[in-house]
Image (cartoon, rainbow, N blue to C red):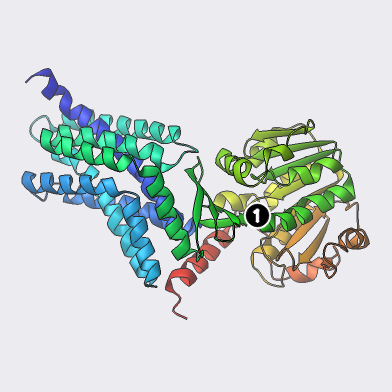
Amino acid sequence: MNRYQTLREPVLLFLVGACLSISQFVMIRDFVTILYGEEVVIILVTAAFFLGLSIGYFLSLKFTEEFFESAFLTIAFLHLTFPFSYRMLAVGIARLDLSGYWYMALMFIYALIFSSIFAVFLPRRIHGETALQKMKILYSMELIGFAAGFAVVGLSWNKGVDFIIPIYWALLAVVIHLALQKKTWTVAFVLIAVVAGSSLTKIDQRTTALLYENKHSFDKATTLMSINSAYQKVEVMEDGDGERYLYLDGLLNLNASDLEDLNYYIAEIPARLIKPAKTLIIGNGTLSSVPKVYPHSKFVQSVELDAGVLLAGEQFFTPKQELVGLDHWNLIIDDGKHFLKTTEDKFDLVIMDIPSPLTIQEAILHTVEFYQLAQSKMTAQGVIAVQLSGPLQHNNRTPARVVAALSKAFNQVMVINSDKADRSFAYASDHLPFNKTDVREMTRDYEENLEILSSFDVPFYLSNAVPLAVDNLDLVLRRGWERFTDRYFDDD
């Protein structure tokens, strides 16, 4: 046996592991975005991928070598259509207004295509008297390849699929060559990949736009940005009227028109009332609230976890000139919890400009424990401002549960209900340095009929509300499941 034959199988399994890792990333990110990325959807899509793996392992020894080669070759060429083919099929389902079962079928079929074929390689190469030894070597190589694939994924952070897909296709071409050892098929695959790769960016932008036109009901969509950050898919879309929208994992985070109202109530009003020496802004990846707070604060510290969201904000929502010359403003990329645990500073104003608690990671930033941590880093009359993702009502829904959590951590909580912003905002403190009259006077010209609930009024709304806490995040799955079933399986 020559050296090539000796190394072929270990190298093949290494590359299979790398391809499996990359395909997992591409598939999960795209389907989470297509189905909208609540925690329930993330769990479901991940489960679909690993089900495909399990089926591949189960069937690996149940067909002939000839059938395996034909099936692998067919599926490998089908991979040249990823991720665009299933996007277009999702567009078709939306256009025909088919039930959610079609989306589920699409997801599981493609998960099977993505992952099962790679799961077949290892079992089919472990046989004979040296099976155990080969198992140790080949499985180790597959695991190392899987880790190498994650390294490639890491290189793709804050880039579009037009960066990672050509790398994936190149690795898959080598897998085809090593597995089948037929130059004709390898050359054919490479030629098609080169031709398809020349239009990847345009195809990515257009298929993304079609998804937003048909699933999100845009009249006309233009894809301004579509990248995968370390945490989520970040997309900036523009509709036919020129309105820009920021979507995170397929969920609307904000649009440009709403930013003015959001920043006014969550940032500008408390800053003007308090005149803080130090302000902390957690979230607000668009950085749009910084210019609103800066004139009223001696120092502003921004903390944003996702560099991809910062990139989107810088390019499409907050012009660079608005941030030029802000000498007393500092931005760091960090987790809000980690920053609060490690900082020695005390803040007069903390602004929580973060998404609604639709995932565990986001929900933790709305809990009693997090607010208690924030309170420990605030001055005696420090105020925390939180947007409630909806109107406060007398129920056990998200706004009431967030306010209930605030009420556990702070002595006083004021809530304003804004029809203009289409949501409520909470200001919490152990000693609120302003009252209803101050807020009314400050906002009269902006929204005359603003409803303001003092710390004496708020408890009425919380009698049914269970505070969000680290050991009580049922809201994430319950609300996610409700939204998921209403979206795809509600026939009314």
The percent position of residue 354, horizontal first and vertical second, equals 65, 50
Decide: is 478 above or below 319: below
Where residue 45 sits, quadrant-wise, is bottom left
Left or right of 248: which side holds 101?
left
**What's the amino acid at mark 1?**
Ala
Left or right of 298: which side holds 21?
left
Say which residue appears at 91% left-offset and 51% top-offset: 433
Say which residue appears at 73% left-offset and 60% top-offset: 403
The residue pinned by badge 1 equals 256
The percent position of residue 268, horizontal first and vertical second, equals 81, 50
* Front-most of residues 426 and 157: 157
Q: Residues within 10 Å of mark 1 (few under 14, many from 20)?
A: some
The N terminus - image quarter: top left
Decide: is 198 above or below 98: above
The percent position of residue 418, horizontal first and vertical second, equals 76, 66
Q: Is residue 375 visible?
A: no
Say which residue appears at 82% left-offset and 60% top-offset: 414
Q: Is residue 6 visible?
A: yes
Identify the residue at the far bottom of this view: 492
Left or right of 163: which side holds 478?
right
- Count numbered badges in the picture: 1
Identify the residue at the far front of this view: 241
Decide: is 288 above or below 256: above
Where residue 411 sits, quadrant-wise, is bottom right
Where residue 290 sits, quadrant-wise, is top right
* Front-most of residues 102 and 457: 102
Does dot 1 land on a helix, a strand or a loop? helix
The percent position of residue 241, horizontal first and vertical second, equals 59, 61
